[in-house]
């Protein structure tokens, strides 16, 4: 199989760093170009980071000395690349414009940004849940006037724990969902060194997070109609999103009501057997067991279970009946791996295997 030449736009940020670390030993993708803000341009990646490398593994030697590009210099950055990963900290209208410029330069964009999540012909993909949405790329290319270029986006990290857990239960008619998420500080691009105020503290607000957590599943569970993804009309989802003093890993407490209530045994069987296109295709980053249920009352735990399946699995526990909803449970995912860069890498693998890259 060909080795894809890949760039990372926004390489100095938390998610950008995760992209770089995941590309180091990837069997299909080779990180050959890195870009960030104009102040990083011309410096080596190591210099541009300036001591801000936040991953647990060292900066990959193969990329540490790459000369940084200005992310807005699209033609130079896109030249010679098969596609880019994008995770930038800019205003939404600026991100939309930047990603379209890359796409129109015939450089596909696999984006971790929220700017294009509700563009009707841009697929927002959790590979195990809605792989078929990639088919809308053909319509997007017609709109953009491109042959290769397109944009595909990841959903928000907050819903990566509970949407996969609900996905195999959809045919029971999911009616109402209440989810409270307890989110790590890396989701804000921070560490305890850069955000000491979070030590021994909880902040009961994350700007824009609840709207994303309630609305984005409607697109994931939507349907391809004509040249766009039509949003689903159900279930009704309400959320509260809370920042907690944890380095990595988003936990969710979930309450769910069904039209046709399944048995506990049936839910556990569905979780145990659930697999999607990544597992069928045996993609390099695909978890072998996507959903793992723990019988212990005190599991899953963030520190113990966030790296389940190399950070690409979802851990679930405490399934029991509820006196207001039908069932309640907790679930956990690694927010910068499955919830961000790792999920985007898996989506790129899916798109590559299906001929879109």
Image: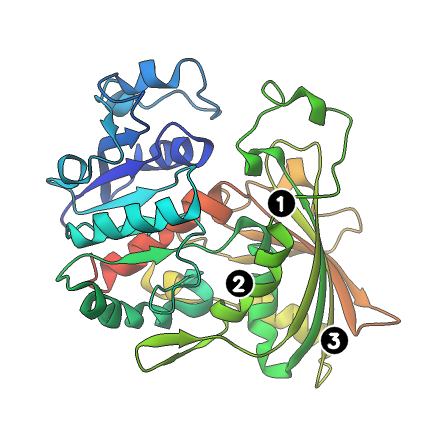
Q: Camera-side residue: 32 or 38?
A: 38
Number of the label disc, if any, that sits on residue 160: none
Mark 1, Cα crowd under 10 Å, few <14 / some 14-19 / many 20+, is: few
Assign a secondary structure to mark 3.
strand
The picture places residue 163, in percent across and down from the top left corner, at: 58, 63
Assign a secondary structure to mark 2.
helix
Q: Earlier in the sequence, mark 2 or mark 3?
A: 2
118 lies above or below 86 = below
240 lies above or below 125 = above
279 lies above or below 67 = below
Q: Earlier in the sequence, mark 1 or mark 3?
A: 1
The residues tagged by marks 1 and 2 sit, at their Cα atoms, a distance apart of 15 Å
Q: Camera-side residue: 319 or 76?
A: 76
In this picture the colour scheme is rainbow
Q: Earlier in the sequence, mark 1 or mark 2?
A: 1
Q: Are marks 1 and 3 in contact (CB under 8 Å)?
A: no
Disc 1 target residue: 207
Mark 2, Cα crowd under 10 Å, few <14 / some 14-19 / many 20+, is: many
At x 24%, y 38%, the residue is 7
The residues tagged by marks 2 and 3 sit, at their Cα atoms, a distance apart of 19 Å
Q: Is residue 142 left or right of residue 124?
A: left
Q: Is residue 299 left or right of residue 282?
A: right
Number of the label disc, if any, that sits on residue 216: 2
Q: Are marks 1 and 2 in contact (CB under 8 Å)?
A: no
The picture places residue 124, in percent across and down from the top left corner, at: 41, 62
Q: Camera-side residue: 1 or 31?
A: 31
Disc 3 target residue: 257
- Name which quarter of the figure residue 3 lies in: top left
Q: Nearer the viewer, mark 2 or mark 3?
A: 2
Where does the C terminus fall, quadrant-wise?
A: bottom left
């Amino acid at each position: 199989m060909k080795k894809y030449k890949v760039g990372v736009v926004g390489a100095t940020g938390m998610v950008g760093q995760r992209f770089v670390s995941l590309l180091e030993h990837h069997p299909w993708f080779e990180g050959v170009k890195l870009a960030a803000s104009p102040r990083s341009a011309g410096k080596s990646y190591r210099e541009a980071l300036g001591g801000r490398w936040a991953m647990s593994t060292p900066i990959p030697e193969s990329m540490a000395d790459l000369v940084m590009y200005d992310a807005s210099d699209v033609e130079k950055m896109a030249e010679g690349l098969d596609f880019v990963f994008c995770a930038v900290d800019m205003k939404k209208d600026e991100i939309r414009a930047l990603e379209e410029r890359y796409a129109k330069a015939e450089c596909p964009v696999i984006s971790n940004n929220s700017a294009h999540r509700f563009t009707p012909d841009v697929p927002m993909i959790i590979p195990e849940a809605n792989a078929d949405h990639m088919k809308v790329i053909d319509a997007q290319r017609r709109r953009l006037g491109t042959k290769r270029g397109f944009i595909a986006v990841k959903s928000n990290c907050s819903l990566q724990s509970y949407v996969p857990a609900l996905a195999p239960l959809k045919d029971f008619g999911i009616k109402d969902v209440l989810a409270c998420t307890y989110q790590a500080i890396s989701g804000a691009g921070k560490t305890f060194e850069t955000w000491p105020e979070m030590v021994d503290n909880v902040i009961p607000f994350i700007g824009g997070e609840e709207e994303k957590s309630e609305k984005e599943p409607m697109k994931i569970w939507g349907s391809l109609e004509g040249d766009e993804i039509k949003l689903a009309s159900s279930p009704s989802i309400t959320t509260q999103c809370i920042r907690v003093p944890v380095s990595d890993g988003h936990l969710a407490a979930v309450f769910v009501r069904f039209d046709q209530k399944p048995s506990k045994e049936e839910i556990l069987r569905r979780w145990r057997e659930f697999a999607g296109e990544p597992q069928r295709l045996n993609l390099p980053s695909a978890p072998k067991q996507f959903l793992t249920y723990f019988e212990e009352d005190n599991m899953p735990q963030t520190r113990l279970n966030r790296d389940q399946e190399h950070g690409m699995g979802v851990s679930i526990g405490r399934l029991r009946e509820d006196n207001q909803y039908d069932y309640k449970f907790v679930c956990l995912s690694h927010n910068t791996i499955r919830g961000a860069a790792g999920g985007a890498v898996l989506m790129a693998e899916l798109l590559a295997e299906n001929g879109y890259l």
